[in-house]
Structure formats: structure tokens, C-alpha cells
Amino acid sequence: MRRLVAVLLGCVLCGSVHATSIEARLIRASNEDGKSDAQLAKLVPKLKKVFGYQLYKQLGIQKADFKDKRTLRLDLGEGIVVFVTHSEVEDKVHTLDFEMFSGRAALVKSTVHVHPGRTMLIKGPDVGDTLLVISLVVVE
């Protein structure tokens, strides 16, 4: 009887551990000479194809778990803060309300649809000769 209770409790706990999380990166794109950051190696070909810059530097990264439908605050450094609210999942596609701020100034506000494991790139503001880019990945 104790074994049965232990097995059932283990099944319930394993089922509830499955959480959806998000990883957000702040990336600076430029046409300067040099090498892109090693942690962006898999992402650089896609970044070059979409934005056309030669050099990509990661300025910040943060991961967080979605809990209920609360808004997550992700501080990515360089004064950039991202707010993400997970609204729904339909056919494994996550709908997220996304807001990017620099201080109190709103830079980007959008609703995005992200497939688990796929990178969503969001164009931020131009800063001189550079561009800020946010990459979002939903992990189940």
C-alpha cells in the first residue's frame, strides 16, 4: 500500500514539474570588424539573414518560468527591460504579449506567436550605427 501511494505521489509531482519558461537575449548588431560572440554562434546565420549586419554581441540574457498568467519582468542590461505575458497556447504555439522599455520610454509593444524551441527575433531601436535585437525562445 505504501508503495502504491509513493508511486502515485511521484507521478503527480513529475507531472507538475513540467513548466514553460522563456529565454530572452539582448543583442547589439553592428558592421564593426571583429567576431560575433561565441554564445550566439548558432543564432548568427539567422541574424545575418534577417538584419544584414556583420557583428553580433550579446549584451544580456535572462531566463524565467511562466507562472499562471503573470507578467514577467526581464532585465536584459543596458537599461533595457522586457515585460512578457503568456496569454495562451494553441496547437503548441505560445501567444505572448511583449513590451520593451528603455527606462520609462516604451520602445516596442507587440503580440507575438512563438513555437517552442524556435527563436523569435524582434527588432528594437537603432542606436547610432547599431541595432538592438531581442531574441525570444520558449522552452517547454
Image (spheres, helix red, strand yellow):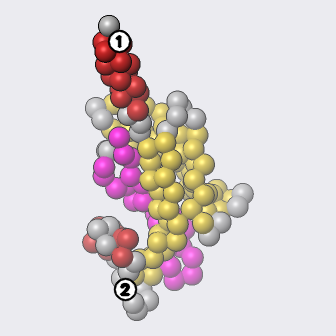
Cα gap from disc 2 to disc 1, whole angstroms: 59 Å
Look at discs 2 and 1 and give the one toward the viewer. Answer: 1
Q: Which amino acid, mark 2?
A: Lys
Q: Which residue is mark 2?
A: 35
Whether residue 132 is visible to the viewer of this picture, yes or no, is no
State which quarter of the image contains the C terminus.
Answer: top left
**What SS does tag 1 mark?**
helix
- Residue occupying image coordinates x 58% and y 40%: 71
Number of labelled discs?
2
Mark 1: amino acid: Arg
Measuring from the top left, give residue 49's x and y in whole percent: 28, 71
Q: Which residues are magenta?
A: 117-140
Name the secondary structure under disc 2. loop
Residue behind mark 1: 2
Please report the residue visible at 44 percent of the width from the left and 89 percent of the height from the top: 32
Nearer to me, 125 or 13: 13
User: Left or right: where does residue 41 sit relative to residue 95?
Assistant: left
Disc 2 residue crowd, few under 14, some 14–19, many 20+, Cα 10 Å: few
Q: Nearer the viewer, residue 51 or 62?
A: 62
Q: Are the residues flagged by discs 2 and 1 in contact, CB closer than 8 Å?
A: no
Q: Name the quadrant containing residue 3.
A: top left
